Image (tube, grey):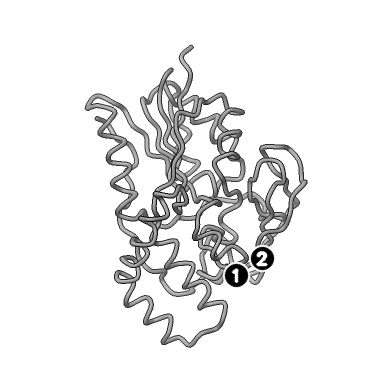
Amino acid sequence: MTVTAPDASLGSPPEGNGATPSVGDGPLVLVRSQCFVCNDDDAEPVAVGQDFEHSSSPDTFLAVRCRRCGLVYLNPAPAPRELEPSHPLGRDLGREIARFCLGLGDSARVLHVRGAEDLDRPRNAYDAVVLTNVLERVDDPLSALKATKQLLRPDGIALIITPNTEATVCRVFQGRHWSGYDFPRHRNLFCAQALDQAARMAGLEVVSARTVGSAEAWVRSVRNTMTDWSLPHWALATLDRTWGAALMAGTAVEWWQQLRGKGGLLLTTLRRPAE
């Protein structure tokens, strides 16, 4: 098996609240946006928040949900920009990807996409493409899905992993602190329905959709809450020092949630139809 662009496997606490260079320290340029699936702006507000993790901008951001397909998106959104590094994968998700790759066989060519630049590769060249934490960050998810189709050989498989807006952790922290918002880096967030519609628009068939656990989503959401509430530095430092133990607690919670179909991440398998 040939695997391109391998991924990290372990989660870790944020490195303080330092600035993220690719965003900048001043206000961002914000532009009006709309649901790229429905091509409409008929949406309801669901969350208002800031960049709690990096304090990269003084802006406050609004997340809205499309009333038709359920897509959650920023409106207004930052002007198009380069992608920033995403959080490393948790151990459980790393095992899911490894299991997916093993099922393809030793001769399969697999591309692991971590950013838009990885989509600029030869067409019809891969048996499988894995997009991890990509669709929520790119400026144009539909173009990314169409590019994924072009990378695949006929009957090739794509695995999409993205935060799940129908997860229990999202419901608990949904108004402001859910880590899936990751203001302002996550521009579009998906439920199963919205991703299904987007995939079909890109000419891909939906093979399956399920959720997997994300223990880190709980811990990062708690940390966002602590930061927003201006808890003392020692409280945040204590959480960071006990990050591993907190992840164990989050794992226990997510084990049950994914059995209910409410896990923190949406894992969708798509196929390029045979031509």
Picture coordinates of residue 112, whole percent (x, y) = 37, 39
Q: Residue furthest top?
A: 275
Q: Nearer the viewer, mark 2 or mark 1?
A: 2
Q: Which residue is more in the foreground, 126 or 41?
A: 41
Q: Is residue 123 left or right of residue 63?
A: left
**Residue drawn 47% across and 73% down?**
223
**Which residue is tagged 2?**
48
Residue 254 is drawn in which quadrant?
bottom left
Residue 228 is drawn in which quadrant?
bottom right
- Seen in the picture, residue 33 relative to 121 is either above or below; the reply is below
For marks 2 and 1 on the same chain, the one whose residue lies earlier in the sequence: 1
Picture coordinates of residue 98, whole percent (x, y) = 28, 41
Q: What's the distance in space between the residues labelled 2 and 1, CA to CA?
A: 20 Å
Amino acid type of the residue that numbered disc 2 sits on in the rendered structure: Val
Q: Are marks 2 and 1 in contact (CB under 8 Å)?
A: no
Residue 39 is drawn in which quadrant?
top right
Numbered disc total: 2
Q: Is residue 249 left or right of residue 162?
A: left
Q: Residue furthest left?
A: 106
Secondary structure under the numbered disc 2 in the rendered image = strand
Picture coordinates of residue 88, whole percent (x, y) = 37, 56
**Residue drawn 50% across and 41% down?**
116
**Residue drawn 64% across and 45% down?**
70
Q: Is residue 42 left or right of residue 95?
A: right
Picture coordinates of residue 150, whole percent (x, y) = 49, 24
Q: Which residue is more in the foreground, 217 or 109?
A: 217
Q: Which residue is more in the foreground, 175 or 117?
A: 175
**Which residue is tagged 1?**
25
**Residue drawn 69% across and 43% down?**
35
Secondary structure under the numbered disc 1 in the rendered image = loop
Amino acid type of the residue that numbered disc 1 sits on in the rendered structure: Asp
